[in-house]
Amino acid sequence: MLRYAFLVAAIVAAVVSPDSALGEGLEAYGEGQRQIGELQTAQGFLTGNVPEFQEGLVNQAIGPYVSGYGSYLKSTYGGRKLLIGEGLASLGQGMQQLGQAQAGLAFVGKDRPTFDKGVETAWKGAGLKIYGDTLSKWTG
């Protein structure tokens, strides 16, 4: 579920105008993701399931960013057409932060494969952010 959150947001942002309450939807999705993270963390802690505990922490960390992105869309793009470049830049920034959180949790948990995946996600997010920023500058 977490893997597809930003992908869904990018696709919807590129196709749907903000007048259709995209921002409000992302706010609600982010809040739900945060709450699911709280439940995962509690369950992982009580059952001793470290991967579930870590995933819960990641969901708690990412949920507010998704919600904040929804608030940003709602406040910034009142009547304007949503620009793909700006959406990609925001998506890239979110991916970068997700990768950093994932790598940090894996480092603490001494989970090398998850750490490597987190670093990879962070680099992909940075590249996507640069691409989105460049696209925004080119399209004016």
Image (cartoon, rainbow, N blue to C red):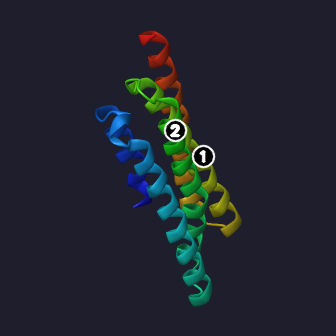
Q: Taking 46 as reference, is 82 left or right?
A: left
Q: Position of residue 79 (x, y in %)?
A: 41, 26
| Observer able to see residue 92 | no
Element type at marker 2?
helix
Q: Residues within 10 Å of mark 2 (few under 14, many from 20)?
A: many
Q: Residue furthest left?
A: 15
Q: Residue furthest bottom?
A: 47
What residue appears at the point 47 percent right and 25 percent down from the top-left corner?
132
| Observer able to see residue 133 | yes
Q: Is residue 94 above or below residue 104?
A: above
Write down the residue under mark 2.
125
Q: Position of residue 103 (x, y in %)?
A: 62, 55
Q: Is residue 46 above or below residue 11?
A: below
Nearest to N terminus: mark 2 or mark 1: 1
Q: Position of residue 100 (x, y in %)?
A: 63, 49
Q: Position of residue 95 (x, y in %)?
A: 52, 44
Instruction: Residue 115: give its label.
Output: none
Mark 1 is on which residue type? Gln
Total of numbered circles in the picture? 2
Instruction: Pick the quarter of the image with the N terminus.
Output: bottom left
Mark 2 is on which residue type? Gly
Q: Quadrant of residue 38?
A: bottom right
What residue appears at the point 49 percent right and 17 percent down from the top-left corner?
134
Q: Residues within 10 Å of mark 1 (few under 14, many from 20)?
A: many
Q: Who is closer to the viewer here, 63 or 57?
A: 63
Q: For the residues marked 2 and 1, what is the alpha-carbon distance in whole angstroms?
A: 8 Å
Write down the residue under mark 1.
97
Circles 2 and 1 in contact, beta carbons < 8 Å: yes
